[in-house]
Each structure stands twice: as C-alpha cells, then as structure tokens.
Image (cartoon, rainbow, N blue to C red):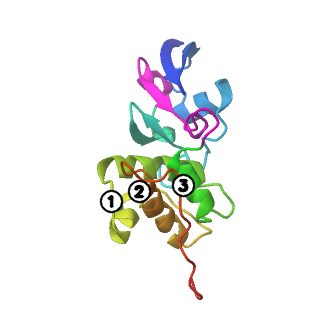
Amino acid sequence: MAQVRVTVDGVEYVDDVEPRTLLVYYLRERLGKVGTVVGCDTSNCGACTVHLDGRSVKSCAVLAVQVDGCEVTTIEGLARDGELHPVQKAFHECHALQCGFCTPGMILQAIDLLGDNSDPDEQEVREGIEGNLCRCTGYQNIVRAVQSAAQAMKPGAAARVEAPVTVAGD
C-alpha cells in the first residue's frame, strides 16, 4: 500500500491505496465521485476526464499514487454556492447532451479548452474536444454550448448563458 494526500473538490484526503489503483477507481470507489465515468479504461473516450492541478487528464490513465500532493477537480466540484459553472449552464441551455454519459468529461475538457482559448471558433472547439467522444449528439450542440459558455465567461458578460437559435435541419 502507498499513502496519498490529495485535495479533491476542495477537500483534502489522506488514504492508503494499492499502487496499481487507477485514479478513476479511487475517485469513484473510495471517494464516491461517481460523476467521473468509466467509459473505456483505455483513455480513448474521455468520459473519465477530470482536472489535475487545473489541467484536464483522463483519470483512467493516471495512477492514484501519481496525484499525491495534487489537486483534483471532478464534475461534482464545479458548482459554487449552488450555482452551476458557466460551461455546465451552457450544456444545459444548449441541449448539449442526450444520454449524459460523456457529459462530465466533455464539460471538464471544454473548461480546459476555454482556459487556453477564450474565444474558440467552431473548428477550434472540435479540435479542443477531439479526445472526448460522444456517441449520441453529433457534436453540434456541444460546440454551440462551448462557444456560448465562452461568451458568458468573458469579463463583463451577463451571467446568463444564451441558448443559440436552432435552425431547421440542425
């Protein structure tokens, strides 16, 4: 066993873990962070994406012992004082989900993208989320949600996320 000290969603944990335990399983099984979804166990789908020290990582490709001394943010840690993060709001308002399986990882990846590029065009959004797969939506509303969140997150922007107008055939 190895001891890890990690801050997850603002709470510090000190735990003994098996050295081979993947971060995704530590989060889900030990800490109850079930919003971090196990999709493929091969780092191909991105459903398990979390933030590690502020950057998105696929938690099925990280060992729990590797996060010793780090800060992890899961989908459960995004809302503040009962208020959804602007990207969460945008996904809701823009109907950027269907089954919801990929949504937590997609949101965390989108936040990372917007940290690097505060005003991405459609192609930049598609490239920025390409490691996160959605099998339901066709990505149009996901791209709209990310762009809508980008606008809502600009300094001086209204806190409200505007849902884009849907055009027939979309």
Please, what is the three-letter code of the amino acid marked with disc 3?
Arg
- Say whether marks 1 and 3 touch (CB < 8 Å): no
Q: Which residue is farthest bottom?
A: 169
Mark number displayed over residue 35: none
Which type of secondary structure does the marked residue at label 3 adopt?
loop
Question: Which stretch did the figure color magenta?
Answer: 64-83
Which type of secondary structure does the marked residue at label 1 adopt?
loop
Going from the N terminus, do you reach mark 2 or mark 1 first? 1
- Residue labelled with disc 2: 150
Q: Measured along the vertical axis of the image, is residue 14 above or below residue 45?
A: above
- Say whether marks 2 and 1 touch (CB < 8 Å): yes
Q: Measured along the vertical axis of the image, is residue 38 above or below residue 143?
A: above
* Residue 91 rendering spot, x and y as whole percentages: 57, 58
Mark number displayed over residue 160: 3
- Residue labelled with disc 1: 119
Q: Measured along the vertical axis of the image, is residue 164 above or below residue 23?
A: below
Going from the N terminus, do you reach mark 2 or mark 3 first? 2
Q: In which quarter of the view is residue 124 placed? A: bottom left
Q: In which quarter of the view is residue 134 placed? A: bottom right
Quadrant including the C terminus: bottom right
Q: In screen coordinates, is 9 left or right of 99? A: left
Q: Is residue 165 magenta?
A: no
For this rendering, which residue is in front, 117 or 13? 117
Q: In screen coordinates, is 94 left or right of 53? A: right
Q: Measured along the vertical axis of the image, is residue 72 above or below residue 154?
A: above
Q: Residues within 10 Å of mark 3 (few under 14, many from 20)?
A: some
- Say whether marks 2 and 3 touch (CB < 8 Å): no
Q: Which is closer to the viewer, label 2 or label 3?
A: 3
* Residue 46 rendering spot, x and y as whole percentages: 50, 51
